[in-house]
Image (cartoon, coloured by chain):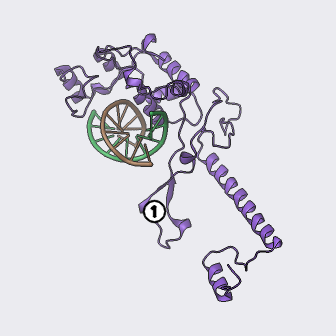
Chain colours: A purple, B brown, C green
Amino acid sequence: MSPVDYDPSMAVSAIDNGAFLYFKRPANPEMLRYLWQHVARETMHMRVMRERERLMSASYITPPCGVGFGDVENPNNNSFVMDNGKCKMNDYYNEKYVEKEYNFDNSRMSQGKVKRKMCTEWTKELHEKFIDAINQLGDGSIFPKEILEKMNVPGLTRMQVASHLQNCRNENWRSPEERKSTPGANPKSSGREGSSRKLRRFGSMPRLKKEKSEDRAYDHGPRSEMESKATETGMANQPMYNSMRNEAFHPHPELLH
DNA sequence: TACGGAATAT
DNA sequence: GATATTCCGT
């Protein structure tokens, strides 16, 4: 605000509309010190609130500030400690707007906002845990819930395991180290299996939805009578069915990272 | 209702 | 591109 257009009524109006401070230029040092104190205090407050939210969300993901992770409720549960966990700033601060929770008074504070869960980074160590779990499970139990239980990682969710399992089955996952060394490489097109039919790893349930004809890389051709029957009777949901149906059900060491 | 998996969103 | 979320099936 320059000395010429300084207007007391405008100052009142500005404060009413949420301004923290209204002052005449040039600003004196006292005023500036006051301003900076306010900024510092607000910043600290925001940090505290964010940290509180982070703990409330019971996620074990390490925030950008680099605090380690552990089981909040059981500090001694250090069965697995992610030493390299991190997430992107965008993810940490990302907020998703939820329309149905939009509130009547239209103020910013009351708009329903839901945080998208912070991204888990599947480090080599975490992935090893995942693979270990799968190897322990063996016949008939390679499902996200079982894997999650075997992994015993505080804060990790079944959804996250399911998502990772999906990527691993489709060979869409590379460790962060690998990604770093060959940033452009496509995990799907990396040599080994060549033109031969790919094996699906860790078993799979029969595909239930109609699929496009060109996208049958993992399929075993048209659904057999056995498969249709299995789906009808619910047998398809029984883990054992997978080993009957899928030759790649047992994870082969060669297929593992 | 809880879960799995594919598809889709972020 | 990696991961979370949604959708739809059992």
**What x and y, as percent, mark residue A16?**
63, 80
Q: Secondary structure at mark 1?
A: helix
Judge whether A112 appears above or below A91 on screen.
below
**What x and y, as percent, mark residue A8?**
68, 88
Residue drawn at point x = 62 percent, y = 83 percent = A13
Residue drawn at point x = 25 percent, y = 22 percent = A219
Residue drawn at point x = 63 percent, y = 85 percent = A10
| Residue furthest out toward the right | A30
Residue at which label 1 appears = A101
**Quadrant of the image occupied by residue A244:** top left
**Quadrant of the image occupied by residue A216:** top left
Judge whether A166 appears above or below A105 on screen.
above
The answer to whether one can see residue A223 in this image is: yes
**What x and y, as percent, mark residue A11?**
67, 83
Residue type (three-letter) at the residue carrying disc 1: Glu
**Quadrant of the image occupied by residue A207:** top left
Quarter in which the N terminus of chain A is drawn: bottom right
**What x and y, as percent, mark residue A148?**
51, 29
Q: Nearer the viewer, residue A162 or A40?
A: A40
The answer to whether one can see residue A143 in this image is: no
Judge whether A243 appears above or below A233 on screen.
above
| Residue furthest out toward the front | A4
Q: Nearer the viewer, residue A205 or A233?
A: A205
Q: Is residue A156 left or right of residue A184?
A: right
Return the chain for callout 1. Answer: A
Q: Is residue A233 left or right of residue C5?
A: left
